[in-house]
Image: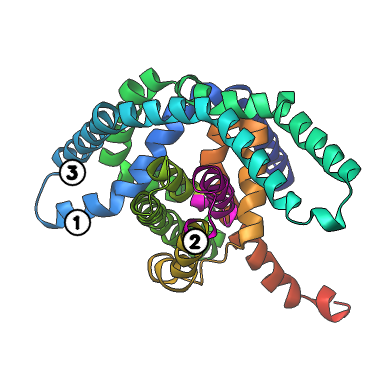
Amino acid sequence: MSVNGQKGYWFIAFLFLIGLLWLLGDVLFPFVAGMALAYLFDPLLDKLEQWKIPRWIGAATLTLFSVLAVFSSILLIMPLLHTQFLEFGVRVPSYLSSIQTKVLALISTFQPHITETDISTIKKSLTGVINSDVMVWVGNLFSSIWDGGVALLNILSLLFITPIVMFYLLRDWDRILEILDGWIPRKHLPIIRQQFSEINSVLSAFVRGQISVCILLGFFYGAGLSIAGLEFGFIIGLVTGLVSFVPYFGMLVGFVAGIGVAIAQFGEWVPIFIIALIFFAGQFLESNFITPKLVGDKIGLHPVWIIFALLAGGTLFGFTGVLLAIPAAAIIGVVGRFGIIKYKASPLYFDLEK
């Protein structure tokens, strides 16, 4: 087969793979999760190998540790979160009603400048918003998030299939990389190895660092809001931290929810200001100390590119696409930068003829 024929063959195979991922997105989730965990724990397993621990024993130990950590979270943390989510969902309508009352009270202080007709119109608008189907949906969202999350993640497959995938991939990780390396065309071996090395650097810096950032932010916001006396402060703070892997989105969601609950709960400016200050302090620490220290500023993944990748992956492949979004974004980013370098070094960039 000619070279062009082989290129066409591999292109068709690539399209077939993309189509298969799209069709089997939900089925592939536990396998993708196992691959992600194997990638995360492989450096630690390499350390264990340096201490003369057989690789299969190290892989089994890390897999068992992961399973125990998940079960511990389910037994100790999940019931608390479940209760908090359900109670928060029940309280959302009352919070909205309280906010409406306080907004109307604030408007009444400007009554000399606003007519009775204007106040009546504003009141009807606020009441309509609160009683609308959208607000009912928001209230039910938190009540059903537990059941929806379990259905989405397919908890049984995660608990039984993912550990098996994780163990075998960890045990055979080096062998798999050796096989893949043997598939690379010998002519382009150094360049492709260099690009994969850069992809690995970007992924390891972002994924491993961002996990630490999310955990630290979750506990910071949760502890800070709880100490400040905010109702459901821990759950709001924890969710804010966990979704902080989407740049600025986590802080924005937490800020809106926290300030909304604060307005309904306190009704005074000082505690509301303290709640806002906690979020601004968390954002300041993340931007200036936590993220630069744990993630670094040279990963090459722009926040806008990350947001787009997550949204596109979730839209195309569901939750599996969310897991694959960051690796795909890193690969496209590295390959794109390499292509730009080659383009700028080519006659096309300088408008020269060969």
From the viewer's side, name the closer residue of 64 and 114.
114
Residue located at (59% from left, 49% from top): 256
State yes or no: discs 3 and 1 in contact (Cβ < 8 Å): no
Identify the residue under disc 3: 55
Residue located at (17% from left, 43% from top): 58
Helix, strand or loop at disc 1? Answer: helix
Residue 146 image offset from top left, x and y in percent: 45, 24
For the C terminus, the image quarter is bottom right
Image quadrant assignment for residue 159: top left
Q: Is residue 336 left or right of residue 286?
A: right
Identify the residue under disc 2: 270
Q: Which residues are magenta?
A: 244-271
From the viewer's side, name the closer residue of 235 and 331.
235
From the viewer's side, name the closer residue of 9 and 30.
30
For the N terminus, the image quarter is top right
Of callouts 3 and 2, which one flags the residue occurring earlier in the amino acid sequence?
3
The kind of residue on which mark 3 rests is Arg
For the residues labelled 2 and 1, the Cα–Cα distance comes to: 51 Å
Identify the residue under disc 1: 47
Of callouts 3 and 1, which one flags the residue occurring earlier in the amino acid sequence?
1
For the residues labelled 3 and 1, the Cα–Cα distance comes to: 10 Å
